[in-house]
């Protein structure tokens, strides 16, 4: 990814590679203490945040209603019935998590992928692919930088641009099925996009979903 970016102190980086080399070192350095520190500092930040909607949303708890509105796709249409309530909770780092094979129609990732390095981002999606049923989707909902990226040095996260995300999706071997902008958020916040992603090309997904009668495309508008 060649686009320039900057950190929360205003320092500019020529590209993401320059930023990652500074933050986590080189990928082939063996035991990477800087990468371990990246994640431990991110965890430490969130351990100090109030466990409330307002705390998680950085003092903007009012955006919760827009986030969960039906128009935003965040309403859990896929698990709305009593027979499909969440039954398993896994307390594990995203960079270490692998879902059960063939278990999910939809894997929803929201406001957390920014803490993963690029390599761990790609590694996660490659592992998580096995968790999808035929015709299944990933839905990624995240803050979007206007250009390049923005590094938050306080919570150790990176806000990527739309082009940055699309470059990573290609590295993951994922296909864009649909993109939608989140509406109703304050103008001073980052824009938010939702990406519906598949492991197969759109035409093949439609054929698979037609046979399986699962995850009808019409619910993602």
Image: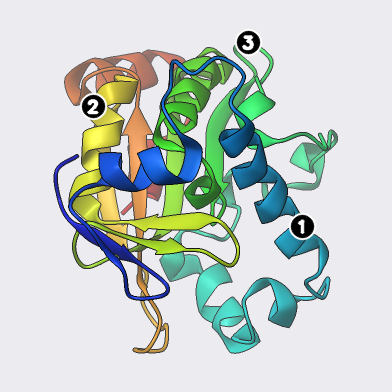
Distance, label 2 to label 1, CA atoms, is 32 Å
Which quadrant, please, contains the N terminus? Answer: top left
> Residue drawn 49% across and 38% down?
24
Distance, label 2 to label 3, CA atoms, is 22 Å
Distance, label 3 to label 1, CA atoms, is 31 Å
Depth check, mark 2 against mark 1: the one in front is 1
> Residue drawn 60% across and 25% down?
104
Depth check, mark 2 against mark 3: the one in front is 2
Mark 3 burial class by Cα count in 10 Å: few <14, some 14-19, many 20+? few
SS assignment at label 1: helix
Height in image: 82 above or below 143? Answer: above
Of the residues under marks 3 and 1, which one precedes in the sequence?
A: 1
Whether residue 214 can be seen here: no
Residue 25 placed where, x, y %?
45, 33
SS assignment at label 2: helix
Per the image, the residue denoted by label 3 is 101
- From the viewer's side, name the closer residue of 101 and 156: 156
Height in image: 211 above or below 189? Answer: above
> Residue drawn 23% across and 15% down?
204
109 with respect to 175 (left or right): right
Q: Which mark is residue 44?
A: 1
94 with respect to 115 (left or right): right
Q: Which mark is residue 170?
A: 2
> Residue drawn 28% across and 17% down?
200
Whether residue 68 can be seen here: yes
Quarter of the image for residue 9 reads: bottom left
Of the residues under marks 2 and 3, which one precedes in the sequence?
A: 3
């Amino acid at each position: 990814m060649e686009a320039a970016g900057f950190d929360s102190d205003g320092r500019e980086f020529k590209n993401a590679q320059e930023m990652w080399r500074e933050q986590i070192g080189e990928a082939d350095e063996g035991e990477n203490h800087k990468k371990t520190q990246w994640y431990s500092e991110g965890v430490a930040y969130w351990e100090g945040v109030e466990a409330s909607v307002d705390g998680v949303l950085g003092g903007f708890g009012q955006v919760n209603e827009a986030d969960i509105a039906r128009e935003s796709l965040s309403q859990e249409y896929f698990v709305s019935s009593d027979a499909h309530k969440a039954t398993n909770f896994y307390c594990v780092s995203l960079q270490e998590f692998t879902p059960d094979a063939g278990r999910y129609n939809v894997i929803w990732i929201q406001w957390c992928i920014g803490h993963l390095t690029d390599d761990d981002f790609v590694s996660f999606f490659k592992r998580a692919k096995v968790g999808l049923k035929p015709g299944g989707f990933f839905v990624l909902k995240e803050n979007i930088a206007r250009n390049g990226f923005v590094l938050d040095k306080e919570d150790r996260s990176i806000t990527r641009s739309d082009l940055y995300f699309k470059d990573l999706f290609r590295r993951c071997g994922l296909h864009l099925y649909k993109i939608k902008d989140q509406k109703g958020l304050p103008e001073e916040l980052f824009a938010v996009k939702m990406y519906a992603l598949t492991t197969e090309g759109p035409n093949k997904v439609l054929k698979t979903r037609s046979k399986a009668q699962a995850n009808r495309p019409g619910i993602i508008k």
